[in-house]
Amino acid sequence: MGIIFLWFQLKGIGQDLHFSQFSNALLHNNPAEVGNMTSDYRFNGIYKSQWESVTIPYLSSIFSYDFKFSPVRKSKNHIGAGILIESDKAGDSELKIMN
């Protein structure tokens, strides 16, 4: 059993998005925040270009849109729905990810 668990540990992916203002990427940090707002809808976009001194810099970006709606008119309860698009390109290595 321990060997199988070790095999799954070695099969990981090492690329992850990093932002300086990570608290502004609400849906990236916590998907439970979808629809948790005082307004009816929210747009969010973050772009980061890292290490400009290398030939091809690292580029990371996030775009999200979420909204809330109430299935019962004039109710305080609501349902949230949204979309999150993430893109990361790691310089010369041509390592790319898009979710």
Image (spheres, rainbow, N blue to C red):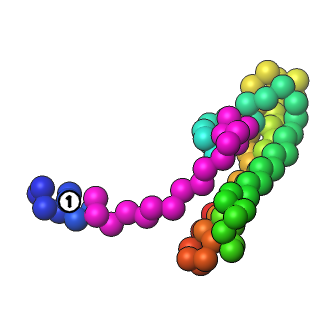
Residue 82 painted magenta: no
Q: Quadrant of the C terminus?
A: bottom right
Measuring from the top left, give residue 69's x and y in whole percent: 82, 37
Q: Quadrant of the N terminus?
A: bottom left
Please report the residue visible at 54 percent of the width from the left and 56 percent of the height from the top. Answer: 16
Measuring from the top left, give residue 49's x and y in whole percent: 73, 58
Classify residue 58 as left or right of residue 46.
left
Residue 60 in sight from this viewpoint: no
Q: Quadrant of residue 91?
A: bottom right
Q: Which amino acid does the dot numbered 1 rest on?
A: Leu
Please report the residue visible at 77 percent of the width from the left and 50 percent of the height from the top. Answer: 46
Measuring from the top left, give residue 67's x and y in whole percent: 81, 41
Depth check: 40 or 92 in front? 92
Query: Does 94 sit above or below residue 99?
Result: below
Q: Quadrant of residue 97?
A: bottom right
Query: Does 94 sit above or below residue 85?
Result: below
State the extent of the magenta-drawn residues as a range: 9-26
Depth check: 65 or 87 in front? 87
Residue 80 in sight from this viewpoint: yes
Q: Quadrant of residue 75?
A: top right
